[in-house]
Every structure is written in C-alpha cells, then in structure tokens.
Amino acid sequence: GLETEISRLRTDLDRATYEANALKGELERARTTSSRYGSDLQGRQAQVSQTEAELAARLRSEQATRKALENEQERLRREMADRDRQIAAYTARGQQVDQVWPWPNCESLQDVSDCST
C-alpha cells in the first residue's frame, strides 16, 4: 500500500518536473523569439525614422529650390516688363524723331551733305 502510493507520487512528481522543465524551455524560446522580434522591430523603427528624416530634409530642400525658382521667375518677369516699357518708350521717341527729321532721304547727319531735301 504505502510503497505503491509513494512510487505513484514519485512518478507523478517526475512527470510534473518533466512538464515544468518542458514549459520552462518553451518559455525561454518564446522570450528569445520575442527579444529577437523586438530587436528587429527597433531596427525597423530606426530605419523608418531615418527615412522620414531624409524625406523631410529633401522636401525642405526642394521647397527652398522651388521658392528660389519662383523668385528668379518673378525677377525675370519684372525685368522683361521693364524692357518692354523701355522698348515702347524708345519706339515712341523714334517715331517722334522720324516726324521732325528734316532729311527724309538721309539715314544720319553724316549723310546730310550728300542728301537732297
């Protein structure tokens, strides 16, 4: 009786110890896997952060370039408008000079002595 009961309890204890060790092994493997995934995740998060920072820097650079190009375009537009006004003024003055030029057959004052009026 008692020896049989002790033997059965020892068998139960051995089985429970074996199962506990197996569970410890599983737990350790799960922790290792979790740690590996955690490290991998941290690495990926760092890559994402770096990529976001690079993209933000590129965006700022491209915005600055665009602003510079817009400023240059505006400067050129104003310059062309100024030239258009100058051309219009010169054209108007040229027409006035043509109207009062007394020697229509001559191109310049150097030709006047050879020109007939």
Image (spheres, rainbow, N blue to C red):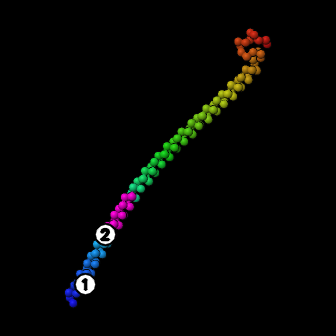
What's the residue at 59%, 37% (across, down)? 73
Residue range (magenta): 25-40
Where 72 falls versus 47 (above or below)? above
Question: Label for residue 8?
Answer: 1
Dot 2 or dot 1: first in sequence order is: 1
Quadrant containing the N terminus is: bottom left
Which residue does the numbered mark 2 point to in the structure image? 25
Q: In which image quadrant can residue 93 be found?
A: top right
Q: Residues within 10 Å of mark 1 (few under 14, many from 20)?
A: few
How far across and down, in percent of the image, does residue 45 sit? 41, 56
What's the residue at 31%, 72% (across, down)? 22
What's the residue at 36%, 64% (across, down)? 33
How far across and down, in percent of the image, does residue 109 sit? 71, 13
Within the magenta stretch, is there residue 77?
A: no
Quadrant containing the C terminus is: top right
> Which residue type carries mark 2?
Gly
Per the picture, the main secondary structure of the magenta-coloured stretch is helix
Q: In which image quadrant can residue 77 be found?
A: top right
Where 53 falls versus 109 (above or below)? below
- Residue nearer the viewer, 60 or 27: 27
Judged from the image, the secondary structure of the residue bearing numbered disc 1 is: helix
> Which residue type carries mark 1?
Arg
Q: What distance separates the C-alpha of mark 2 from that of mark 1?
A: 26 Å
Where 94 falls versus 27 (above or below)? above
Left or right of 79, for residue 28: left
- Residue nearer the viewer, 106 or 92: 106
Left or right of 52, for residue 35: left
